[in-house]
Amino acid sequence: MTRLTEVYPADRITLREVGLRDGLQLARALPATAAKIAWLGREGAAGVRHFEIGSFLPAARFPQFADIDAMIAVAARLDLHSAGLTLNERGADAALATEIREMVCVVSATEAHSEANMRRSRADAVALVGRVAALRDAAAPEKLVNAGIAMAFGCSISGEVDPEEVVRLAGACLDAGADIVGIADTVGYAGPKAVGALCARLDRLCGDRPFIIHLHDTRGMGIANAAAALDNGARVIDASLGGLGGCPFAPGATGNVVFEDVVFMAESMGFPTGIDLGGLKEARSIAEEAMPGEEFHGALHRAGPPENTKWEAVGAD
């Protein structure tokens, strides 16, 4: 627990930047490694400390993550907390051989999505979490194991999802050895009421452990859902610079909730983030230049922070 609370303190909010992983899953224009490093460095200088920086997947099929070793090395040099997606045993072995600080596993809330996404049952996916945790314990005990429950608020294949199943799966992942669990509105089905209710359930399940909420803004509910999550115990929120990203099972999805907007929302609700909005704007410019034609989003970027008021982000130390 000590290592977990060092990385994700229970007494403050943590924002995880997933643009360099989830944000690039469906990108048409892939940024060069140099641009990704500049993006990572500028956000780090702005006060962002937690990043999903890639996936341990075959480079031939996922060229956007072929440079994950280089990204891990830069994150380590900058003392940023790095996380990478490990969808199978091969990915876990690859992750253990690197300086990645967090290994991210996925368990689907429905059998249909589990088979489509991972070609394994939910039970097998939970068992994989256990194997990854055991490998970690033996080879690299300093690394964290994160288990995210995909399609937690509704499935694009199966439809409605029983919250009881989500809580059961999250508990099973913790029992299997995961240090932290998360719940994902993978296709942007949820509204604030559903997000608040399930976050309250996860808060009770996890006790003094934090949990992660991963939101997509497919139907414009991302910021409202993030606020509901904060109101109901969530202290770790995933978001993506410019709202990049999307899910292959949600055609037309606008991607993740916008990182800049989540910073503004959190500060407005009284949760200091330590993140400088001006630095985020500069990081966004790097990403936009590197990904011509890619659609970026964000109300804060469009309107700017309020003028002639006392509001301001706390900013980086």
Image (cartoon, helix red, strand yellow):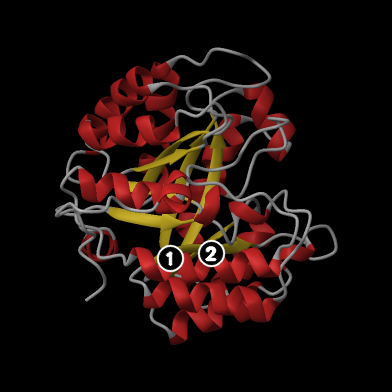
Identify the secondary structure beneath mark 2: helix
Residue 10 is marked as none
Q: Is residue 60 above or below residue 260?
A: below
Residue 33 relative to residue 103: left or right: right
Q: Can residue 125 be seen in this view?
A: yes
Q: Label 2 sits on what residue type?
A: Arg
Q: Nearer the viewer, residue 302 or 276?
A: 302
The quadrant in which the N terminus is found is bottom left
Q: For the point 25% across and 37% down, which residue is it?
A: 230
Q: In this view, does 28 lie above or below 231?
A: below
Residue 129 relative to residue 27: left or right: left
Q: Label 1 sits on what residue type?
A: Leu
Q: Distance between the residues labelled 1 and 2?
A: 6 Å
The quadrant in which the C terminus is found is bottom left
Q: Is residue 71 above or below residue 202?
A: below
Give the residue furthest to the right: 60
Q: For the point 53% across and 64% down, which residue is it?
A: 284
Q: For the point 22% across and 45% down, which residue is it?
A: 268
Q: In this view, does 9 lie above or below 234?
A: below
Q: Mark 2 — residue? A: 284
Image marks 1 and 2: residues in contact by CB distance under 8 Å:
yes
Query: Residue 21 at what x, y percent from top left?
Result: 60, 58
Q: Mark 1 — residue? A: 280
